[in-house]
Image (tube, coloured by chain):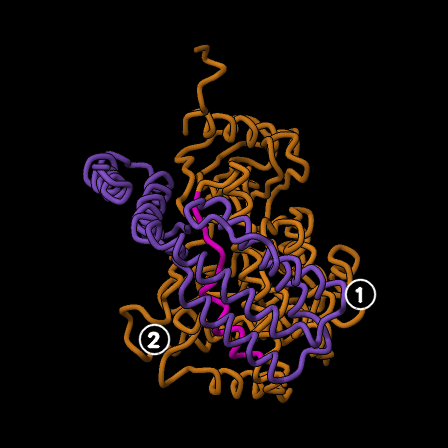
């Protein structure tokens, strides 16, 4: 066997990332010299992308610079096909806003430096815990964080996307945002489907029959959850993972966080449940929430989650994804139950 | 035949968990290994149930399809009739059972989106789907990534 036939080691991959990042930074900052990295490590998380953390330093005409960085690079097998250009534009647009998000530095949109599309951003202080609302903290702290997450969601919806030029970058939904998202995810479903799924087709037809109109077009995060945020003390320091952000219906993110199948991530039993979240959202935004419309977005959230899992199945079978997923049959009963709320 | 398939799968999980996993220091590799072990454990439990599930599911799916025929277009009804009239699948051939299941579920995927289904038919479809989902032997086994260090994210 020749060396060429051997699989890449983790060191090989890290070496290529280091070299590629050096080239990207040199390209972005031609006057930079003595570019140095330390602590380059790929984290265990990130189902859709490779997440690399590192410390970087360099010198230019302005002096010496040292930054804590995160590099997100598209994985060979991914659950979400997304555009780095859009993510970069969104993070740039958020910099002057009230939304806590990492400052973005550089982008490799076509992978010419890093081998796959990538973005490099500031590594923000804080801890990522997808169960932070139901962890060991006292109830008062958890409730404070739950309210802070909702405030953050409302801040995202308040971003002036028109003034920031995001309409051109992200594109406006064609027609109703609900139908637009349904069409987008049906396309993904048909792309990754390996076998018939009557359950998903039946629910899709129900969603299509009952798609609601939107009261406004806002910036939607697309995967709003504690697991995509950093918390330091009792403060949310950054909302992360903007690769699925888009322009759409204000109820889309609200439907994601009130989705019954993910209540352990987003809700605190007896204190911060669907009714309290909806009441607080209506108070913060001044907009009443239709129960039927929110249920539609709850159901859509589950259906989209099912499609993402089918993407994982497809990528695993193709030999491009290293975790084993199954057909999401665990979602079928809750989805069919939710459909009753749409009739 | 000993070791049986289940014994081999359970034994493989034991060895991976007790011998290999403690030596895997890289967090990403360890998370992937934990996922693989959890999935192998699920397979060890599920594998003996797959053929029985497919036999029962094929029969139940065909029964449901026939009951929906009054609301379906003639072309689909004729394909359902052909599936109904086909020679019995060899119940000792897992691939044949699985192939027939795919055929029937393809027909069902078309039938359930027909606009002329009555409320009673829709209720029957939903009961069937919920019952089937409760019996599917192979299920996703979530594994939790190791906790991230402070000031970093996973």
Q: Is residue B54 left or right of residue A136?
A: right
Of B133 and B91, the residue lying toward us? B91
At 48% from the left edge and 87% from the top edge, which residue is drawn?
A: A275
At 53% from the left edge and 73% from the top edge, which residue is drawn?
A: A335
Q: Are marks 2 and 1 in contact (CB under 8 Å)?
A: no
Callout 2: helix, strand or loop? Answer: helix
Q: Are marks 2 and 1 on the same chain?
A: yes
The correct choice, above or below, for A93 with respect to B3 in the image is below
**What percent of the width, then of the height, locates residue A22?**
55, 29
Any mark on residue A141, and which?
2
User: Which quadrant holds residue B67?
Assistant: bottom right
Any mark on residue A174, and which?
1
Picture colour for chain B: purple
> Judging from the image, what is the letter of the chain drawn in orange?
A
**What percent of the width, then of the height, locates residue A201?**
63, 65
Of A76 and A44, the residue lying toward us? A76
């Amino acid at each position: 066997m020749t060396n060429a036939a051997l699989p890449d080691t983790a060191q090989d991959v890290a070496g290529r990332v280091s070299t590629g990042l050096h080239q990207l930074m040199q390209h972005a900052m031609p006057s930079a010299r003595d570019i140095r990295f330390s602590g380059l490590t790929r984290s265990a998380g990130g189902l859709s992308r490779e997440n690399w953390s590192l410390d970087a330093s360099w010198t230019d005409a302005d002096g010496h610079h040292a930054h804590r960085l995160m590099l997100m690079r598209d994985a060979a097998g991914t659950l979400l096909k997304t555009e780095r250009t859009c993510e970069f534009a969104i993070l740039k647009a958020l910099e002057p806003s009230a939304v806590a998000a990492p400052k973005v530095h550089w982008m490799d949109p076509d992978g010419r430096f890093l081998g796959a599309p990538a973005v490099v951003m500031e590594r923000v202080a804080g801890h990522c815990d997808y169960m932070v609302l139901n962890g060991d903290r006292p109830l008062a702290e958890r409730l404070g964080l739950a309210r802070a997450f909702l405030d953050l969601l409302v801040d995202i919806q308040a971003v002036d996307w028109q003034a920031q030029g995001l309409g051109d970058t992200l594109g406006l939904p064609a027609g109703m945002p609900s139908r637009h998202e349904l069409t987008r995810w049906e396309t993904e479903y048909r792309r990754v489907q390996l076998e018939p799924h009557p359950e998903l087709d039946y629910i899709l037809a129900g969603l299509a029959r009952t798609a609601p109109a939107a009261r406004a077009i806002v910036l939607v995060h697309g995967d709003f959850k504690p697991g995509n945020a950093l918390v330091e003390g009792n403060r949310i320091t950054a909302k992360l993972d903007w690769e699925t952000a888009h322009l759409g219906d204000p109820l889309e993110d609200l439907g994601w966080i009130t989705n019954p199948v993910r209540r352990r991530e987003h809700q605190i039993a007896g204190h911060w449940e669907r009714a309290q979240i909806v009441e607080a959202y209506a108070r913060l935004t001044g907009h009443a929430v239709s129960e039927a419309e929110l249920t539609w977005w709850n159901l859509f959230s589950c259906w989209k989650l099912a499609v993402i899992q089918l993407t994982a199945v497809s990528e695993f079978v193709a030999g491009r994804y290293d975790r084993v997923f199954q057909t999401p049959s665990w979602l079928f009963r809750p989805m069919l139950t939710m459909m009753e709320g749409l009739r | 035949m000993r070791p049986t398939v289940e014994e081999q799968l359970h034994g493989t999980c034991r060895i991976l968990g007790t011998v290999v996993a403690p030596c895997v220091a890289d967090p990403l590799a360890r998370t992937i290994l934990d996922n693989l072990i959890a999935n192998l454990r699920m397979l060890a439990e599920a594998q003996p149930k797959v053929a029985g599930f497919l036999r029962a599911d094929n029969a139940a799916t065909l029964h449901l399809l026939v009951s929906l025929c009054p609301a379906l277009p003639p072309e689909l009804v004729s394909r359902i009739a052909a599936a109904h009239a086909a020679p019995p699948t060899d119940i000792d051939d897992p691939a044949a059972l699985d192939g027939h299941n795919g055929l029937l579920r393809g027909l069902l995927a078309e039938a359930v989106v027909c606009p002329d289904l009555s409320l009673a038919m829709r209720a029957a479809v939903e009961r069937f789907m919920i019952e089937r989902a409760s019996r599917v032997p192979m299920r996703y086994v979530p594994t939790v990534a190791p906790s991230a260090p402070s000031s970093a994210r996973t």
